[in-house]
Each structure stands twice: as C-alpha cells, then as structure tokens.
Amino acid sequence: AQTVTQSQPEMSVQEAETVTLSCTYDTSENNYYLFWYKQPPSRQMILVIRQEAYKQQNATENRFSVNFQKAAKSFSLKISDSQLGDTAMYFCAFMAANQGGKLIFGQGTELSVKP
Amino acid sequence: GAGVSQTPSNKVTEKGKYVELRCDPISGHTALYWYRQSLGQGPEFLIYFQGTGAADDSGLPNDRFFAVRPEGSVSTLKIQRTERGDSAVYLCASSPTRLAEGDTQYFGPGTRLTVL
C-alpha cells in the first residue's frame, strides 16, 4: 500500500519570501504521478502542480516549483514570492499509474503568509 | 464552463437517519470520484466511477455507504443509518478522460455532513 507523509503540520512565511513544503511517499510502483493541491477555507481543492514520475525534470508553474527526488521518494513544493492569497492548506497526493486515478493524500500542511 | 458542483453544501442529520449527497461533475467528464475528509486530515478515497459503473469501491468503509451514477453524469452518495463517526466533508471530483490515470482531478466544494 502506498502512503504519503507531510511532516510539517503548520508553516508560516513572510509575504514576498520563499517557503518549501515537504512531502515523502512510500510505494513499490515505478510508474506514478504526484500532485500538490491547495485547499483554501472555501474547501475547494485546487491543483497547484503535478509531476510525472518518469520525467526527470522538475515541474514548475509560475511561482510554484517542485523538487522531485525519485530515489529518495521525496516531492517538496517551493513557493517563491509568497502572496497573502497563498494562505491555505496544502496537500501532497500520489496516484499510481495502474489504479484508475485514485489519489492518496498526505495529512496536509497549513501555510500562513504574513504581511 | 461550470466546475464540479455538490449539493447540499451543508447537511445536519440525526444518528440513524438516511442521507443523500449529490455531485454534478464537469460536463463531459467520464471519471468521477468520491473522497471523505475528516477534520484536520487529508481526503480519503471512497469510490471511483468510469461512466455508469463503479470501477473501484474499495474505499467505502462498510455496507451503509453506497453510490450510484445511473446516467454517467450526476452521482449520488447514499449513507444509511448514519453514525456520528460519519461526520466529515464529502468531496467529489471528476476528470476528463476514459483512461483516467494521470488525469488532473477537478474538485467540488464538498458537502459538510454533521451527524448529531
């Protein structure tokens, strides 16, 4: 069975600074996908960034980038130039390539961006 | 176009009652997922539909939980004889392709169920 672990329940960062959220996972699968989702107080999960395990290049989306270390089973999210609107719960999620799209989520990290 | 919608947004019921939670996926999306999110936790998978059929219901906690998607679009999650431990936010998500794996899932705002 796959598991996803986020070891930082809460993080805070000053506006305009950079913050890194950690995620590790455990799997015996070789083909899979990794995601970071953001959940603001409105509850709606919003995709931040995704990574295919077969790609060595780290994914980037504007101010968001990942550090994907396949051998270490690590998938951290870096947020640059943090904005007040980045305040939310962030969930790391794993999807095996042969399990129909089922997402396995970590426990979440609550990020606060302070002015 | 519209995103995933869920109704009701909040539902309060008494222990032992029956509840139905509805999900309207994005038009044309073939895959539909239900997740349950307890307070302070990440979402947990319940069931996945590909079209009208349940492709994977391994996450349903027991036989009090059942879900349908009779016409391949709207889905209803049904909970019989509700218990206080069923209190959670129930999230629905959809994704566009028949293959589903690797697809981005688009989530609705969830239904907060409170069982008194």
Image (tube, rainbow, N blue to C red):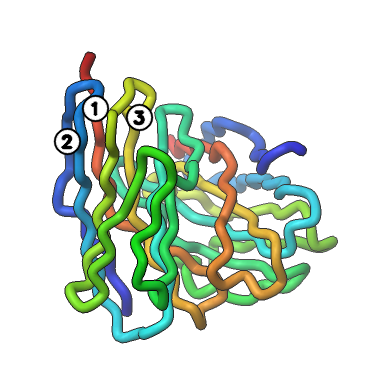
Alpha carbon separation for disc pair 2 and 3: 12 Å
Alpha carbon separation for disc pair 3 and 1: 8 Å
Q: Chain of mark 3?
A: A
Same chain assignment for discs 1 and 2 = yes
Which of marks 2 and 1 precedes in the sequence?
A: 2
Residue contact at pointers 1 and 2, CB within 8 angstroms: yes
Answer few, some or many: residues within 10 Å of disc 3's Cα (few below 14, many 20 plus, some between 14 and 19): some
Residue type at mark 2 is: Met
Residue at 62% in and 70% down: B100
Q: Nearer the viewer, residue B61 or A115?
A: A115
* Residue at the top extreme of this rendering: A115
Residue at 44% in and 58% down: A50
Same chain assignment for discs 2 and 3 = yes
Q: Which residue is mark 3?
A: A86
Answer few, some or many: residues within 10 Å of disc 1's Cα (few below 14, many 20 plus, some between 14 and 19): many
Which x, y percent locates residue A109? Answer: 24, 43
Q: Quadrant of the N terminus of chain A?
A: bottom left
Q: Which residue is mark 2?
A: A11
Which of marks 3 and 2 precedes in the sequence?
A: 2
Which x, y percent locates residue B108? Answer: 59, 42
Above or below, comparing residue A4 to residue A79 in the picture: below
Residue at 20% in and 44% down: A20
Residue type at mark 1 is: Ser
* Residue at the right extreme of this rendering: B71
Q: Nearer the viewer, residue A66 or B70?
A: A66
Answer few, some or many: residues within 10 Å of disc 2's Cα (few below 14, many 20 plus, some between 14 and 19): some
- The disc placed on residue A112 is 1
Which of marks 1 and 3 precedes in the sequence?
A: 3
Above or below, comparing residue B86 to residue B63 in the picture: above
Local SS, label 1: strand
